[in-house]
Image (spheres, grey):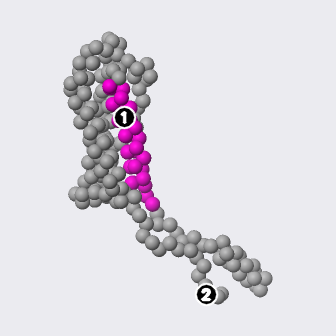
Amino acid sequence: MNGFDVTFRDDRDWVDFGKSYVHSDAFKTLFREGMTLVEETAAYLDGEGRDESRLVSRDATLSYATESMRLTTLLMQIASWLLVQRAVAEGEMTPAEALLEKHRVKLGSSEPSKPQDFNQLPVRLQQLIQRARRLHTRILHLDSLITEDRPTPAPVESPVAQQQGLLRMAFRMADG
């Protein structure tokens, strides 16, 4: 054996996406977007939405109630996730504590509406639902990136070193 180590190693520190993301401008923008949507939806449902709910057809009344409750639940999940991530960014909570919190507040899947029910809703409510679902989809993706377990990559042996190892084994067998 010649003593050369031909194993490729990357000894640099790996970037923890969750730690870097919650401190980024992108997260601050997402946080503002989410909280603005929560406030906008609450204002709509308490004001203009109430008036519009009285104008929908009798058949659409149940759809309106169901969809507004789904929307409220979805936005509560989004707001909870955003607040937990902000707490991590501000050092009020560790990533491990955030993971425990995640088990209390589930980022459930957004159940799609039946098209015939959705189309009976006021246009403004439809827009809010669509925005909330898009935001929810983004957050689910980010959450999976943040909480994904990333094992430290093992050093990768170079193809040359692999071939040398095979040759050494072959010569040992021949001598053997």
Q: Which residue is mark 2?
A: 3
Residue 77 locus on image (x, y percent) = 31, 40
Which numbered marker is on residue 131?
1
Residue 159 locus on image (x, y percent) = 66, 72
Under mark 2, the amino acid is: Gly
Q: Which residues are magenta?
A: 124-150
Examine the rendered structure and indicate whether residue 40 appears above or below residue 173. above
Q: Is residue 169 visible?
A: no
| Residue lying farthest to the bottom in this orientation | 2
Q: Secondary structure at mark 1?
A: helix
Residue 32 locus on image (x, y percent) = 28, 45
User: How crowded is the residue under tag 2: few (<14 C-alpha within 10 Å), some, or many (20+)?
Assistant: few
Res. 132 image quadrant: top left
Q: For the point 35% across and 42% down, which residue is it?
A: 107
Examine the rendered structure and indicate whether residue 147 appears above or below residue 64. below
Residue 25 or residue 112, whichever sits in front: 25
| Residue lying farthest to the top in this orientation | 58
Residue 125: in magenta span: yes
Quadrant where the image shows the N terminus: bottom right
Residue 44: in magenta span: no
Residue 155 locus on image (x, y percent) = 54, 71
Q: For the point 42% across and 70% down, which residue is it?
A: 13
Q: CA distance from mark 1 to mark 2?
A: 61 Å
Res. 74 image quadrant: top left
